Image: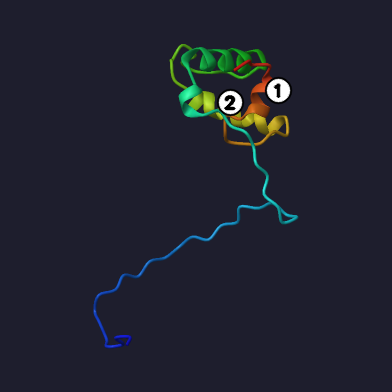
Amino acid sequence: MIDSSPTSEYVIESFDISTIVKAGGFTEWKEVICDSKVTYKLIKKIKEQLILEGFDLENYKRRDFGPAAKSALVQYQKANDLPIGNLDIETLNHLGVKY
């Protein structure tokens, strides 16, 4: 038997619904670099290539992939019609960076 008596124990939650598919109704999977594989040497190579592509990176010698490098990567991806926002295999190949 189901208890249908009123209760004051409830939580109201709101959700943001977003779409994960592109027009056309399918999802694209992109191979990305696992965080454990992102080494200082890889970061250095990526930054060097972005500089060669004309991007100005503040604090180039920082050992991490800071905001300036992330911004440059996204700009590079947009300019070259690449998947945007992640450090993916396609972007690394396009930059000519071996991983």
Crowding at dot 2, Cα within 10 Å, few <14 / some 14-19 / many 20+, comes out as: some
Residue 42 coordinates in the image, percent (x, y): 54, 16
- The kind of secondary structure element at disc 1 is helix
Q: Position of residue 25 (x, y in %)?
A: 72, 56
The numbered mark, 1 or 2, whose residue comes first in the sequence reads: 2
Amino acid type of the residue tagged 1 in the rendering: His
Q: Position of residue 22 (x, y in %)?
A: 69, 51
Crowd tier of the residue under label 1, counting other residues whose Cα lies within 10 Å: few below 14, some 14–19, many 20 or above = few
Q: Is residue 18 above or below residue 28?
A: below
Q: Is residue 90 in sight in this rendering?
A: yes
Q: Quadrant of the C terminus?
A: top right
Q: Residue at x 43, y 15 (%)?
A: 63
Q: Given the current orientation, which residue lies at the most extreme right position?
A: 24
Of all residues, the one furthest to the front in this rendering is 1
Residue at 49 percent across and 18 percent down: it is 58
The label on residue 61 is none
Which residue is at a point 62% across and 18% down the rendered structure image? 50
Res 72 label: 2
Label 1 or label 2, whichever lies nearer to me, is: 1
Q: Which residue is at the front of the view, 9 or 80? A: 9
- The answer to which image quadrant residue 31 occupies is top right
State the quadrant of the N terminus. bottom left
Q: Amino acid at mark 2?
A: Ala
| Residue tagged 1 | 94
